Amino acid sequence: MVRGYPEVDFSRGECTFCGACATACKDGALPRADDHALPWTIKAQITDNCLAHRGVECRICGDPCPVTAIRFSPRLGGPPVAEVDAATCTGCGACVAPCPVNAINIT
């Protein structure tokens, strides 16, 4: 917790949107959303720290993505670069922990 506020630590795992945090929150600060709404609008962003920008082949972030929001575009002279489809990304954070260089932010 930061200053008494709950926070999500994507380095420990992704959010499955199960609602357990809203159920556990006794003060009602985390209201339960309806079944079709995501609880936030945050999305994954790939930073320049990504291994592909250094010429190293890596696609580890795409494997755990449950909605296949991370795609790899081919490019001349280097390995494919990871790109996030913001319209598809749920912001679950499944891609964060597997990244070996911490090149993914959820913002």
Image (cartoon, rainbow, N blue to C red):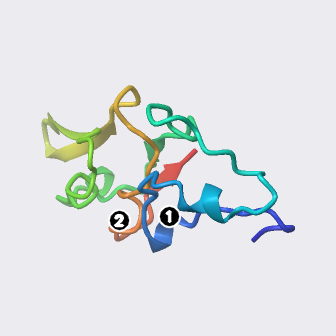
Q: Which label belongs to residue 45?
A: none
The amino acid type, in three-letter code, at marker 2 is Cys
Q: Residues within 10 Å of mark 2 (few under 14, many from 20)?
A: some
Disc 2, disc 1: CB below 8 Å?
no
Where residue 16 appears, as percent x and y from the top left, is 41, 56
Where residue 56 appears, as percent x and y from the top left, is 21, 60
Which residue, given by chain and number where applicable, does mark 1 sit on? 10
Q: Quadrant of the C terminus?
A: top right
Front residue of 4 and 76 = 4
Front residue of 70 and 12 = 12
**Relative vertical location of residue 48 with respect to residue 43 in this rendering, above or below:** below
Residue at the far right in the pictured view: 3
Q: Is residue 57 left or right of residue 90?
A: left
Q: Secondary structure at mark 2?
A: loop
| Earlier sequence position, callout 2 versus callout 1 | 1
Locate residue 55: give its quadrant: bottom left
Q: Residue at 86% across / 67% down in the picture?
A: 3
Which residue, given by chain and number where applicable, does mark 2 sit on? 99
Q: Residue at 14% across / 42% down in the picture?
A: 77
Q: Is residue 49 left or right of residue 63?
A: right
Q: Residue at 23% across / 51% down in the picture?
A: 62
Front residue of 88 and 35 = 35
Q: Residue at 45% across / 49% down in the picture?
A: 47
Q: Residues within 10 Å of mark 1 (few under 14, many from 20)?
A: some
